[in-house]
Image (cartoon, rainbow, N blue to C red):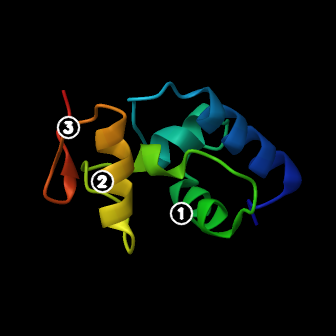
Amino acid sequence: MRNTPDFEEAVLEVLDCLPEGEVISYGELAAAAGYRGAARAVGNLLRATVRPAPWWRVIRADGRLAAPDSGRQAKKLREEGVAVEGDRVVLR
């Protein structure tokens, strides 16, 4: 199981360092935290954590927003200057 205190700390630390207006995929976040291949575990962690974290900056590898709250995610990303069209971030 990847959701250990060390995993949680590593993932949230990377996410906390992600600048406003930037996005990262679940897989990229897992790899940056030292847990390559743990994209699903990152998603599970972000759904379950009570610690405030900029979850809206995490997207799917294909640029799609995370469900089920993609409307709220799109709003928060747009507020940070990220281009969102439909249910996708416009990747540069």
Label 3 packing within 10 angstroms: few (<14), some (14-19), many (20+): some
Foreground pick, 87 / 62: 87
Q: What amino acid type is highlighted by mark number 2? A: Ala
Residue annotated with mark 2: 74
Foreground pick, 15 / 3: 15
Q: Quadrant of the C terminus?
A: top left
Per the image, label 3 sits on a secondary structure element best described as loop
Query: In 3D space, how far apart are the residues under numbered discs 2 and 3 (Cα atoms)?
Result: 9 Å
Q: Quadrant of the N terminus?
A: bottom right
Per the image, label 2 sits on a secondary structure element best described as helix
Query: In 3D space, how far apart are the residues under numbered discs 1 and 3 (Cα atoms)?
Result: 25 Å
Numbered label attached to residue 40: 1
* Residue 21 picture location, percent across and down: 38, 29
Label 1 packing within 10 angstroms: few (<14), some (14-19), many (20+): few
* Residue 26 picture location, percent across and down: 47, 50
If you read the primary sequence from the N terminus, does the residue marked by circle 1 or circle 3 appear first? 1
- Furthest toward the front, the residue is 79
Would residue 75 appear left or right of 36 to someone viewing this image? left
If you read the primary sequence from the N terminus, does the residue marked by circle 1 or circle 2 appear first? 1
Q: Could you say which quadrant of the image residue 18 lies in?
A: top right
Tell which tag, 1 or 2, sits nearer the viewer. 2
**Residue at the image point whose x is 64% and y is 34% from the top:** 16
Per the image, label 1 sits on a secondary structure element best described as helix
